Amino acid sequence: MEHIIKGIHHITAIAGSANRNHDFYTRILGLRMVKKTVNFDDPKTYHLYYGDEKGTPGCILTFFPWGEISAGRRGARQATAIGYSVPEASFNFWMRRFEANGVTYFKTAEKFGEPYLTVFDPDGLKLELIASKTLDNRIPWETEQVKAVNATKGFHNVTITTNHIEPTDAILTGVFGYRLLEQQDNLFRFATYADNNAGIVDLIASAGEKAGHVSGGSVHHIAFRVENEEILMQYRDKITALGLHITDKIDRNYFYSLYFREPGGVLFELATENPGFLVDEPVDGLGTHLMLPPQYEKYRAELETSLPELI
């Protein structure tokens, strides 16, 4: 198979309260806690991973919950919305659920022929529940309150707001192998042909939009997936050849990563599918224990005491 980007691997955002974040994503939205670990660069803070049963690439939303952090501001040079695939018949269920739990949402609208429901998490992160016009056979995680018939199936897309689409377009099409699918006014839809799901990036072109501020309720970075480390390093060579700064390979325990800021201003990550989230926990035990990278294992007792208990 040609060595191409296979879609979104995960998306990482910033939250305030860890418990408020955990309650919203596991209880209200019905996602599985896939991994409870720490921020490798700030080990006194959680890094929480939510997704499906096994933490399949293309469904993982992760958070750095930094407590009393100031609110971010959506704007240009930023990922401004995360789209989840849901069954179209689920919209009434979700609206009733959001109303019952005091969650802010907007009633359904449509773009590119797909109806969607906008909702905001407790920190103001903008999510869109989208009925994809492409068949989505992914098996969702279900809970007692959110059954599979209504549950999210993983990412549909991510939206980036930019002053000019050309710099980001050049990375998506010239490096990642994406193609422009559709345009609707100032909204441009790009997709990879490697996967029918979790493969869409929407660019909103807004020349006069003020740059956003990444903080609480903001996307920190978008991670795109590659099959393995060999392909990962091939992409490093491609990006270096463009004169862009890119990190060395970083071991994140569950995947290997490279980070670079695309010319439009958004932090991109490239992440491998290997070794996956089952490397240190069995599938039936995912997310049930605090998992630490080797360099922080000696601080386990201190961290277990200082990190808030997730209720």
Image (cartoon, helix red, strand yellow):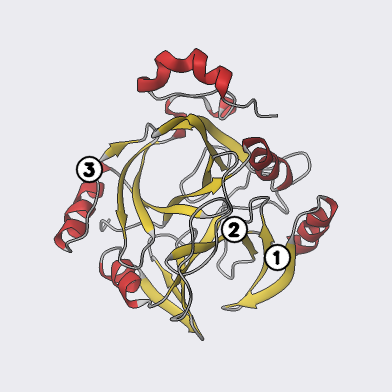
Please report contact status of discs 2 and 1: CB closer than 8 Å, yes or no: no
Task: Name the residue at 60% across, 56% down.
Answer: 125
Residue visible at 58% across and 38% down in the picture: 53
Image side of residue 305 versus residue 148, left or right = left
Seen in the picture, residue 38 relative to 166 is either above or below; the reply is: above
**Residue farthest left in this picture:** 241
- Determine which residue is flagged by label 2: 84
Displayed quadrant of residue 238:
bottom left
Image x and y of residue 303, in percent? 51, 20
Read off the residue under disc 1: 88
| The one of 19 and 50 positioned closer to us in this rendering | 19
Circle number at residue 42? none
Give percent across and percent down for residue 199: 45, 61
Identify residue type, mark 1.
Answer: Glu
Residue 165 is left or right of residue 212, and the answer is: left
Mark 3 residue element:
loop
